[in-house]
Amino acid sequence: APHPHSQSPPHFFFSFSVRSFTPSPLLFSRPLLPRCCCCCCRARLDPGTLLAVAEASMSQAWEPVNRKGKALFDFAPPPDGEFQLPLKKGQEVSVFSKRSGWYKGFVHVDGEEKRGIFPESYVSLTEESLPAGNDKLNESTTKAKESQVKSDMGTSSGNKWKPVNKLGEALYEFDGSGKFQLALEKGGKVVVLAESRGWYKGYVQADESKAQGFFPVAYIRLTDEPLAVEEGTQATTLQPLSQRSAISSPRVKPPPPRKAKKDSIMSETITVSDIKEDNMTMQALLKEIELCMSLWLEEANDKLVEGHVTDYQRVQERITTLLELRGQLLEIPAEDMKMDFPPLRKHIIHLIEKSRKMVVGFMVPRNSKGMLADTSNTSIMELMRLHDEMYRPGEDAGHLSFSERQVHRRSTISAMRMLSKNMHSVSEMINQALGRKPEIDLFQLVVECSMVITTIREEFHLTFSLWNKTTKAPMTDEWSLTFSELGMAKNVLNTKTIFSDLTMADLEQDLYLVCKVYRNGNLLFEKAATQVQAGKPKDEPKYRRPFFISMARLTDVGLNKFVEKDCTPGREFSIRAPSNELKFSELPKSILEGKTAETKAVMEAKQVIVTINLRNATLKATQERNEGELEGRVVTRKLFFPKVFNPAETRNDFFVWLDTGKFLQGSKKAALNVQVVVTVWLDDGKQVQKAIQGSGNPDPQDSYVSSVYYHCNSPPWGEILSLKISPEDLERAHLQFVVYHASTNKKNGTPLSFGWLKLTSERGAVIPDKKYTISTYKISSNLKELKGCKYLHIGADKNLKVRKGEEIQVSTKLLSTLKTQNDVLHSLFKWKTINVPQLEHYLKLFVKTPYSSEETRRYMKEMLEMLFSMLESKSHEMNQKSKLVHPKVLSALLHILSNLKKEEKEMLQTYIKDVFKFSSVHVILLDLVQKLMKEQLQEVGELLVPMCKSYHWLMHICVRSYELDTTNSVPLSTLKESLRNTLAPVSKLLKRDIDEKKAITRGQDCLVKILPSLLQSFEKIYSGEELAEIVVWLVKSIHPNPANDVPRLNLLRVLTEQIAFRSSAQGTFFPLLLEMLQKYILPRSNGVDECYLSINILRKLLEFIETTSGVEGEAHVDAKEASRDIRSAQEASQLAMKFIELLPEVTYTAVLLLRAKVESTLLPPPSLGVKSLCKGTRHLDSDTLICVITFFKLLPEDKLLEFIGGIDDSDKFKFLQRLLELWTLALRLNVYSEVWVTIITLQVQVACKVHAMLSDLLCSVAKQPEELGVRKEQVIASYFILGLELLQHHDLATESMNGKRRRLVERMLGTDLRPRIRKSIVALWGALGDRSQAYIRSLIPGMFSILQQKLDDSDQGLKPPEAKTSGRMSSTIESRIKDVESQKMCMDIYYSMIVTEWRVTKHINKVERYTIDVLSEIIHDSQGRGEMFYQMLNTELKERFSKDVENQKQPGDIFLNHIGHLFNLMSSLLKFPTTAIYEDERTSMALALMDYLKQPDESGQIRREMYFRYVNYLVDLHAELKNYEEAGITQLLEVDMLEWSDNVVDARGDLPRETERERKERLYQNANSFFTAGQNWERAIEMCEKLGDYYRHDQCDYERLASVLKQEAELFSKIASSPRFYPSYYMVVFRGDFADEKDGSEYVYRGGKMEKVMNFSQRIKRKYPNAKLVMRSEPKEKELEENKQIICIVTLKLPPWAKVVEKGLASEAEKKKTESYMSNPRVTEPVMEYFENSTRSVFLYEKPEQKGGKKPENEFKDLWIRETYLKTESSFPTVHRRCKVVSRNDFMLTPIENAANMIASKNRQILKEIAKVQREAEQLDVGPLISPTLKSPTRTQRQSTFGFAVSSSALNLSNPTVSLSKARRGSFLNIGGGSSRKDTTEAKKPQLQVNTLSSLLQGTIDAAVNGGTKLFCEAFLIPSYRAEHSSKVDVQRIRHLRKMLNEQIEVLRQGLNFYGQVCPQAYRPLLEHLNTTYAKMIDSLKQYAM
């Protein structure tokens, strides 16, 4: 098989040879240079590259394995896995050897041994070994590769070794570690035999064996004495000198670096400094590639040695890609050099420059002349475009993996094989093959068929056509040719055809080349074969019989194989025949549909030999190529017209498809062998000769004979006939079909029937394209000869009879530019033969008839020439009636021109330019246009819009007609006047109001769109000045409606390209352009379309100003195609001055865009239409900025200052402030990529120019005695900020750059600009005097940033990177420079600030405030760096204060103390890690810092901004930890300090710059969101009320008020119906030695919602891993002794507020609030629950104590409870989640009180659960429940609920007193009648969650019988207890216990009643058990008088 790079076509003619398996190691590993190792490439490589290839190929040997194994998985090789072996799971495998994750071996398939490679991970080896000698494959492969490399290194004819034959001396040591390298010793003598591209070949003189090898040229110094070399010394076969791997060998010591030229910045990098040609030659490019290869190889070795595998793979990919591009470069034929070399050269340079960007960290692209682009040889706009093209996001494959980058590389290099056949689209494959995009969208497919190989000897007829898989139909006519019995073409001149005029869209349709083969022989194929084998062929009639079909998909063949070169597809052509002969015509369609089961193989047919070639050229150019090789060859056209074709081309094809037929068998026993003969006759009875071409007829014949289907009465022919008839004969033509029966008898040739088809209608137009059914006529005995005259008289001839049931079906299609199927068009084409009234009639019909796009394209030339001929007609009748005819002709012309589509417009342009030939039309047409335009405008007629659409075409036609007028019948001045007159109504129409009529609006839109095209035609008539006047006149005529803004600007955009280069037009056109740009350049709130277009226009204008196209005269030359050179500075400045008034607007536009970028404000994107128009504008902010840069680069300082001085003061300082802000923003933002060194340096250069230019101006302003005003102060502040920003910019710190970047920057900037900047800043500061206090805030941030550079001396981690490691420059902070002078200046100014403020105000509050602000930012960025900076600043100031003689030491010390204290607080906050564990510490430190900031300073002000910053910090902390309630409370700290005022507050974080009222409103909304998220809906309602009052009374904004009220209503609804969970509280006591806690510290922690004590304790344990956790309030003594750290954790309770009040622990406010809640009977349970859980500062934990020595039998009798009440310093929830315990109170509960409390608690739980289930039942709409509805308890009842007494009325009982007699009667045992309800009813009801209620009832009732209640009674209600406790208090306690028990009885009864209604059927047994147990409980209480 040939190599992919080989020029010779492959041959697959007769058989497929099985190639021996010789895998290259390059296929299985990742060597340095993979893949491209073919001889054709190696022959051209230098020895150094060959050495790398050889070493990479031989470095990794195959390690022997020789064992058997088994496949673990199925393995299917990819399409390009040429030597990979497929495996099946479980298959036995024999493994020879392994390498790089691959095994080599074989498997047995169907008894055949198949060898190859397969992944190691897919096979499991066994212990069984292979017999010796099996690995011949590995041995032969290794030997073959070694011999191949040796041959290539020594004997290859491609490597031209130049003889040297001299003695040399080694200058350096060379270890010769690779194969074929020769080791050298420094100073050793060597014999140099030959030299090739940087390498010598020779041997060491002292070596007697004279073993030869390679060594670098740079290592050798040759002597002058020649060397007599013995014959045979120059042996070309080298022996390996070392077996060491190149990959693992140490690096070669490099020779000394070459000296770079001083003016070259690229010589040290990748490119060659010697390339100075404007257009890089082939040799220069090869030299650059060689240098790149050497550097990249060294870089690859470095990466591999350092272990950077990914980087190594990327370098490897670059090397491989460059090698392949080099191979393509060397394969370009000489005749294609001009076409193919430039795009390939551009591709190579792009790769090199892009790689250099990755290596050294910046990029400098080349311009169109191949030079390194900078401002000296390239315009700024072109620089921008070059950088943008070279660094497009998403196109860099560097982020891909190694395998993904391989795919990426292969898809972009045409020499690589496709990974799969369907991987790329056709267009991509063609682009790859061409190495560029096609020059034209036109392709010619040349097909040559030279041989058909079969085993039978018969003549063959072949037809070739292209089929579309989508439509399953042919898309071209058939090309026919005939082959002899020997398989050779009968006509050798007819073996090639051209499938003409294919477009890319056609090729994308998945085309197939289909070949139908008919044999011309006996009827029966088997009979013919038998006769041939017997050698006795019988002389029988020959018929065309279907044989087989051969077809191939073009993409399967591989388009890249035959683009611009011949290719023989060979085996890609499959040969199939239908299983049924009748399906022969449908076989291609069946194959395309995938129905291959209907086909069969043809054993007698071997191959159809076809060569194909796809050429990207016109048909004419293809025919003339290679000395007219294809001239005169058959052209096969498509069966349709292309979208665009040359109107001059004519076509007159009429196709007839012979589809099928139905024929009568008659008296014959078997079906007929039908054969049809087709002829063409004229209406006069004459037969047309040579009129039909079809299958089997390579040339036109008199008749066409169809194929024959054996014994078939309905033959499915499916054959195409092409009629070759002149247009005149076609009008009178008829087709005759004669039917024969084909027989083996030669004498049997009698026709059976015949039929006719007339090809034209009655008026002469061609019949429509459709299917026709033709009747046949019986042939009588007296009608032996069929003539046309008989057909013409069918009606009169009684011998002609129709054969009923017999028919022929045909289809027709007309493809002609001369003949039409439209009767009106046909009549108009013959207009000279009709009179004027008829002509008027047909013209009216023409205008009313809509024509399809295809008809317009097909007949464009004929229709236009028909109309123009009417206008130019000199006939007497036409001259007399011209006033009637000419307007109708113009209407017809408008009908054509106003309905043109895009493709038709292209054809019309071609027609006017190349085909149009009427030289006097302009005289008539201009007059007609002017009159019609006036009439239509006055009446707003129906032709107004068509006239506006067609106006420019009419003017193009008039101008072209004038150019063809050689007689000068109309003078130029007259023509100009006529054109002006036609423009007058156009101007009037443009001025009309857009709202008048719809036709007016549409007409205006059309005119605005066509004006650029119109003026393009006027360029040939008018001078530049006249053209500019017309432009200004028309543009100003456009109605000033906002809807016309975009069309007006688009018109200016096009006109700028057309006439800006005309020097005579500039004086008129430029003022209009300036006016329009000033009006539209600023972005608008409703869109940026106008701004987008304006910037695009300005870019084009500035590029014109920068460059000269050489076409600035009056000659019409396309400015886009002209070469551009840089203008002189003076000339460019003069042109730029004409637009200097635009500078303020452009500057402000850039500021607005950059502000939006800073504030992350999304501007509305441009509309798609505008974006498509402005293709050069990609990013509005960067494009606007580059326009400002260009302005300042072009304009000198004196002109700029003169312009600034001429502006009014108010506008002047507004402009200056925006200008300074712009450059500050531009330097801070990454507007351009950091690797765009040229653009960024240019930006810095212009910024320095602006800063220096304004120095004197602002100093004079600062010295003025009057007040400066706000605007001037802003300008001066911006000046300081810009200066400090420039001093920090890395492009001015050239000393920190590597050598390459430094030279580039220094060449652009010149000397160091920083001294001048410092001088300007100091001068302005001194000029301000005491006014300088206004600029403290502006200066401190920038000065502190510069002062941080001092820290770099001790901070090694922030040193700039070394040049060798990387050339990249990081951000400003990371790449700090050591600018000592700038640091000293900043410290001087800072000290001056302090001194001046003290002298003027007697305090230093302002400096202190802004110093603290900046220190806060520094310490937040880096705490360690912040502390170092503070120490440095403190030391410096102390030293200066100590030396001060003006008594500044005392205020200085106060200043430093304030700064130090605040800095310590900030440092303490930041020392804690930002994790949830240290939440409390971070919160406490932030609060301490906020308390300090809230204290007023000496001037009485607080540091509000910093305070707000830490409030925001605390809010973010809580929100991150989902402490939403705390976040909302913290947010209110800032809200409380804001007023409802219009004072402006600065932006902070996500908050924009806004007024205080807007900020306060925003923060209220934030707090509302936090409270809502934390389910504290009551606090959220408070926020809504605050906002509602603001909207109602302050803003009167009822719309927002309605929104707030709606939200408030939703919150109330949530309170009433939504369940919520409350957090738990824990007491934490620290005992022992803790770093941050004192021994015995007590805290109350607020846990998370649903957080259990175990989770909480684990959280504490993570914070203190060494501490022992004790789940008690106090540790034991032993625990204290054994552990250094102990943490006690106790779960706390929230005591009821009533109890807190009772204990005297509530404040007065809390007492009143409790009283109000307890006394209100309407307070619902959810509201009361919130009241009990909110604003809590008192907590309770209980500790049981047993008194008495022995354990009592009844545990409750002696169970005392110690209640401990803890009070915290703040009420929860608050801004933090833990509070210190400030007091504790202990109370003891007696056993009987404890019992009463336990019963009351259980009652509360049951009541709460009943209420919960009842609410759930209401939500689920279960239906009415018998249980009484719970009501809100009264005050007394509420107290009992909280532990005192519970009344039965709380349950709304009908009888609050429950007697035991009633209970004993058992009236409650059938509670609720639950057992009587039907299961069906229950099944339909929704199921309620009653598990909790079941547990409560069961636990209480069972405990009452078996434990709890019984024990209480036994302990406290027995007589002995009453006797012992007879005091008044004890009696009250006993009564209270009885009351609780009675209430529990009633609660349980009512609970069981309710439970009986809601429990599901499965719980019925439990219900019965509870009823029984309850009855027992009642009986057991009887003895206690209950």
Image: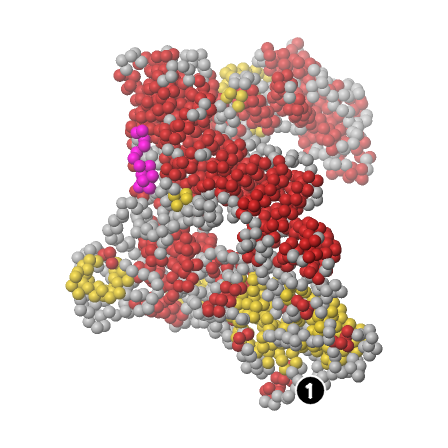
- Image x and y of residue 1012, in percent: 55, 44
Q: In which quarter of the image is residue 177?
A: bottom left
Rendered location of residue 1552, percent (x, y): 52, 27
Residue drawn at point x = 74 percent, y = 30 percent: 1818
Does residue 1296 appear in this view? no
- State the residue at coordinates (72%, 28%): 1815
> Chief secondary structure of the magenta span?
helix
| Amino acid beneath label 1 | Lys
Q: In which quarter of the image is the N terminus?
A: bottom left
- Horizontal side, residue 59 vs residue 560: left or right: left
Where residue 658 appears, as percent x and y from the top left, is 69, 71
Give the vertical position of 1784 relative to 557 (above or below).
above
Q: Give the range drawn in magenta.
A: 1301-1316
Quadrant occupied by the C terminus: top right
Is residue 1466 found left or right of 732 in the rendered image?
left
- Which residue lies under the disc numbered 1? 746
Tell me if I can see residue 987 in this picture. yes
> How many numbered marks have been drawn onto this rendered protein structure?
1
